[in-house]
Amino acid sequence: MPNPAPKPIYRITDLHEADRPRERLASLGPQALSNAELIAILLRVGVKGENAVAVGQRLLNTFGGLIGLHRVPFAELKKQHGLGDAKAAQIKAAIELGRRLTLEAPEERPAINSPADAAVLVSYEMSALEQEHLRVILLDRRNRVLETVEVYKGSVNSSQVRVGEIFKEAVRKNASAIIVIHNHPSGDPTPSPDDVAVTRAIVQAGKLLDVEVLDHLVIGQGRWVSLKERGLGFA
């Protein structure tokens, strides 16, 4: 007689104990788990036909990964099969805690030694923003982060950006250097002519104020561009 088909796995408890996300986290640490497994721990249970890991993977596929889950409105997320208000709130809360973690304990942050260091600091949040935001990372003499301040929200172009606003907090906090960063909601980080013009004006002002402008980064969807590396706006 042919062997019976294997029983479908719909529940986390149907998995072998060594494969269950919560047990794997306890024994191996959270870094060993996939994004879908971490989401499964938040969800606790799945739906008919899908265990919690499968639901987590479906959400990642539907919205384009963690960045998509960060960006999707709560009202849209809770409509997904198997979620509802409580589970959608748990996912949004977990992502927000991750975002806030990057903002705390600045003394524990590494020094910014490259454009990549700066991009890592802000890409997670800024790549998910639906409008353009311009922020400035303030640095001390050792290139350690003092603070990240938001200067503009909306279109970032040479006719609207007031250079004095870029340096306002830098002067007040006695920063030695700054890195300017803004996002392109389209997802394409290619610098525009306005981006180059703004950069040129900021660099010139920094020389007058004795505040070094180390770079201007444009953040896109999963990509970023350093204007300094491309020689745009930096003499």
Image (cartoon, rainbow, N blue to C red):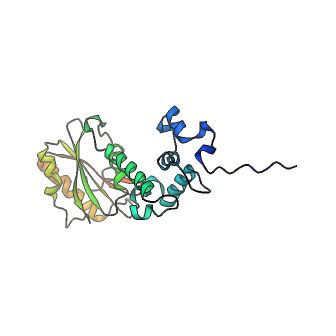
Name the quadrant containing residue 20: top right
Can residue 187 be seen here? The reply is: no
Residue 175 in the image: state x and y as whole percent.
Answer: 16, 42
Q: Residue furthest top?
A: 27
Which of 194 and 29 lies nearest the eye of the viewer?
Answer: 29
Q: Residue furthest right?
A: 1
Is residue 85 placed above or below 104 in the rendered structure?
Answer: below
Which of 115 and 41 lies nearest the eye of the viewer?
Answer: 41
Q: Is residue 207 left or right of residue 157?
A: left
Name the quadrant containing residue 77: bottom left
Question: At 60% across and 39% down in the image, what residue appears?
Answer: 19
Residue 34 in the image: state x and y as whole percent.
Answer: 52, 44
Can residue 189 be seen here? The reply is: yes
Which of 64 and 5 lies nearest the eye of the viewer?
Answer: 5
Which of 28 and 46 lies nearest the eye of the viewer?
Answer: 46
Is residue 194 placed above or below 105 in the rendered structure?
Answer: below
Residue 40 in the image: state x and y as whole percent.
Answer: 51, 48
Residue 187 in the image: state x and y as whole percent.
Answer: 40, 61
Q: Is residue 128 left or right of residue 41?
A: left
Name the quadrant containing residue 150: bottom left
Q: Is residue 4 left or right of residue 30?
A: right
Count of all numbered marks drawn on residues in the image: 0
Question: At 47% across and 60% down in the image, what residue appears?
Answer: 63
